[in-house]
Image (tube, grey):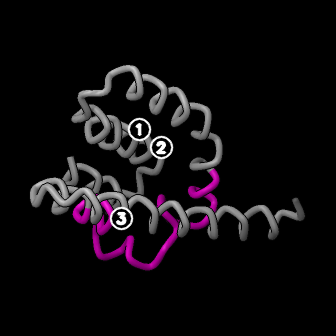
Amino acid sequence: MIEDLEKLIVADSRIEWAAKHREFHVEVFGLSTQKLILKEVIRLWSLTDRYRSLLLATGSPKGHSEFGEGCVEERSLVAALKAKDRNRLLAVYDDERNHVESILLNVLRDRGL
């Protein structure tokens, strides 16, 4: 899935990238045995899709310099999963969420919102 994401980056296929990005994260979340919580996570993810779509306005699907180097966040998540390192997995998600929040606030500010 990461290779597919990277191909979509190179092809500048942002809409397809967004769909594949969501699919990737649903697969990661789907590893949980907590299916009730999983359903809620997917519901909340759907509710926040509109905010992630603003990332497309930044010139790249994820809007940060590491993006050109490949799917850094996704590779970090997979590495943490392989290592069964829950703390690292949560740290990767926290770092990325904070980064995305910063980007979105800048986009909204630039739009006068």
SS for callout 3: helix
Q: CA distance from mark 1 to mark 2?
A: 7 Å
Residue hosting label 3: 92
Where are the magenta residues, as a range?
Answer: 54-76
Q: Are marks 3 and 2 in contact (CB under 8 Å)?
A: no
Residue 89 is labelled as none
Distance between mark 3 and mark 2 Cα atoms: 24 Å
Q: On the picture, is 112 further left or further right than 3?
A: right
Label of residue 19 in the image: 1
- Is 6 colored magenta in this rendering? no
Q: Residue lying furthest right in this view?
A: 112
Q: Amino acid at mark 2?
A: Ile
Q: Which is more N-terminal, label 2 or label 3? A: 2
Q: Position of residue 18 (x, y in %)?
A: 44, 45
Displayed quadrant of residue 26: top left
Where residue 2 appears, as percent x and y from the top left, is 22, 53
Q: Is residue 67 magenta?
A: yes
> Label 1, label 3: how many angstroms apart (C-alpha)?
21 Å
Q: Residues within 10 Å of mark 1 (few under 14, many from 20)?
A: few
Residue 1 lies, with reference to residue 108, above or below; the image says above
Depicted 104 relative to depicted 48: above or below: below
Q: Are marks 1 and 2 in contact (CB under 8 Å)?
A: yes
